[in-house]
Amino acid sequence: PAFINKSSDWHHRKAIINLLQIISFNHRFILSNYEQQQYIHKTIIKLLSDPQIEVRENAKTALSSILRGSDLDYILSLHKRFSKTASTRLPKQKKKKSKSKKPVSGNNNHTTNVEDEEKAKAAKLKYEKLLIKRHSGVLGLSSIIGLHPYDIPDWFPDILVEVAQHNYDPDFIHTSVSSTLKRFWR
């Protein structure tokens, strides 16, 4: 997946997903080499944690498509992997303090404010990375749900429950869970 890291434009990464999906589907029997298939799977799984949400959503759809026909053991191993990633703990976000209108005297307060801002930025960046990691796990589980639109295997309800438990997660995770469950119940 090195070529993906070199692309700074998320449109390119999204296009690569579509290309890999077509290659995987149309050349499934030509790509009989296990390593070649795994390379495509690993690349798409890596893109589930892309910083751009459109890339992640596209990777979820593509993964669901290319996993069709995979053996149960492989799907269950992915389930464990995605479950672990989806259970990533998110730190509690601190509420922003209102700025006081007191005049600042001395230079120590200025450096303290700069340090506090840097700490807040670092904490926000860490939170966003953990949020994306958790979202990638939920998207991976959602892609497994997309494998069985017309039947419910024995191991399937556990995944549905696990995805539903993320319905109250913040931001885009909630949206992904809602759309997955709506699509499943159709």
Image (cartoon, rainbow, N blue to C red):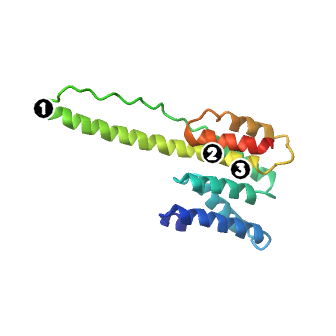
Assess disc 2: are there few (<14), some (14-19) or many (≥20) residues with their C-alpha within 10 Å of its C-alpha. Answer: many
Give amino acid for label 2. Gly
The disc placed on residue 143 is: 3
Give amino acid for label 1. Gly
According to the picture, the residue beneath numbered tag 2 turns out to be 137
Q: Position of residue 112 (x, y in %)?
A: 23, 34
Q: Position of residue 175 (x, y in %)?
A: 63, 41
Label 3 SS: helix
Q: Position of residue 138 (x, y in %)?
A: 64, 43
State which mark lies toward you, 2 or 1: 1
Q: Is residue 42 visible?
A: yes
* Residue 97 figure quarter: top left
Q: Position of residue 21 (x, y in %)?
A: 70, 65
Give amino acid for label 3. Ser
Viewed as shown, does residue 82 lie left or right of 95?
Answer: right
* The one of 79 and 143 positioned closer to us in this rendering: 143
